[in-house]
Image (tube, rainbow, N blue to C red):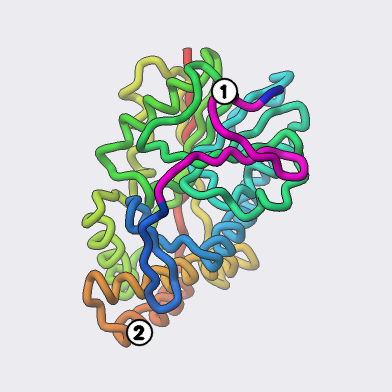
């Protein structure tokens, strides 16, 4: 299966990378962390965040035992799109799981894994779903979008979902995955951290708990049928065993990643942030805390 002809392409050793001519990203470096200023994304865009996202990917896969909820195994040569592909890890794993598929990842930056990609059936393209997807109507059998609550303004979600639907074939599936920002039940420290997150996200129009609204967002699109929404409560902390320890590590890494920009933009006292950061660990253990992850699938008629 060929890649799309309307972009200037360069080939890696096996797969393809499609480079779109764009202006240089507007970024800022705070305490050694890189943040994009030209997109709404509220987390860093650097190697530390790449490592955290890869870690989070493997953690979620370990928890639910799969990379996808939608049933696509019956499709002979599926066309697959990952919107906001991040590190590209999901794309490469799906390419291995479905060797007859063409798996395409789109993000505002080409992932580092593309530099040494061996999978001939995988491709990456630079793009921003907020500006529209660079694909024709009815192209993909399966469109996947995960962990973009921190990247898409709340008022853009209806338009983004229509764009996902546009590029999905009739009979194809759309799958959305969102992990809530809150670790519940909320203690004093957890409430403070959630408050900071919500304050900063509000400055960019982001709703970090958008996962709770996925059912309503999909229900507003009558062209989508067989809508199903699930949630998994994932343990956070050593009380939850190895998986709980790993998810706690992921959350703490995310909090550490936003500290510099919260200090800069919200005038949060660094010592106060550190005290809250440490106190949450104790709260998670005492309360047997969990993170809720939402999965939503829908079929285009």
Q: Are marks 2 and 1 in contact (CB under 8 Å)?
A: no
- Rounded to the nearest whole Å, what is the CA distance between mark 2 and mark 1? 47 Å
Label 2 or label 1, whichever lies nearer to me, is 1
The percent position of residue 197, horizontal first and vertical second, equals 30, 63
In this rendering, does residue 244 appear at all? yes
Percent x, y of residue 10: 65, 39
Q: Which residue is mark 2?
A: 275
Q: Which residues are magenta?
A: 3-23
Residue at image position (22%, 57%) is 203
Q: Is residue 223 left or right of residue 79?
A: left
Tell which circle, 2 or 1, labels the residue nearer the N-terminal end: 1
**Quadrant occupied by the N terminus:** top right
Residue density around tag 1, few if under 14, some if 14–19, many if 20 or more, within 10 Å: many
Which residue is found at the position 50% from the left and 25% from the top? 135
285 left or right of 56 in image: left
Q: Is residue 184 visible?
A: no
**In front of the other: 102 or 205:** 102
Task: Return the residue found at the far bottom.
Answer: 271
> Residue, x 66% and y 52% (percent of image)?
113
Q: Which residue is mark 1?
A: 140
Q: Position of residue 291 (x, y in %)?
A: 46, 57
| Point 46% across, 39% down: residue | 127
């Amino acid at each position: 299966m060929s890649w799309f002809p309307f972009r200037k392409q360069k080939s890696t050793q096996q797969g393809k990378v499609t480079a779109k001519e764009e202006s240089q990203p507007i970024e800022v470096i705070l305490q050694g962390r890189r943040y994009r200023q030209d997109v709404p994304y509220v987390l860093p865009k650097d190697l530390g965040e790449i490592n955290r996202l890869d870690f989070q990917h493997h953690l979620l896969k370990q928890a639910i035992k799969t990379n996808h909820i939608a049933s696509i195994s019956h499709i002979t040569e599926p066309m697959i799109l990952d919107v906001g592909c991040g590190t590209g890890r999901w794309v490469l794993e799906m390419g291995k799981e479905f060797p007859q598929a063409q798996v395409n990842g789109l993000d505002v930056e080409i992932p580092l894994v593309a530099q040494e990609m061996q999978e001939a059936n995988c491709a990456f393209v630079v793009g921003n779903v907020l500006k529209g997807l660079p694909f024709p109507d009815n192209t993909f059998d399966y469109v996947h979008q995960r962990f973009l609550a921190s990247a898409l303004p709340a008022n853009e979600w209806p338009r983004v979902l229509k764009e996902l639907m546009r590029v999905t074939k009739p009979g194809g599936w759309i799958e959305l995955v969102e992990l809530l920002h809150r670790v519940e039940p909320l203690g004093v420290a957890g409430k403070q951290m959630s408050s900071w997150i919500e304050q900063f996200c509000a400055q960019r129009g982001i709703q970090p708990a958008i996962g709770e609204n996925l059912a309503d967002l999909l229900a507003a699109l009558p062209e989508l049928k067989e809508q199903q929404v699930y949630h998994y409560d994932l343990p956070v902390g050593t009380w939850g065993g190895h998986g709980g320890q790993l998810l706690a590590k992921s959350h703490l890494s995310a909090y550490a990643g936003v500290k510099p920009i919260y200090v800069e933009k919200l005038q949060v006292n660094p010592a106060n942030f550190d005290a809250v950061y440490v106190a949450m660990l104790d709260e998670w253990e005492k309360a047997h805390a969990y993170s809720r992850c939402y999965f939503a699938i829908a079929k285009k008629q």
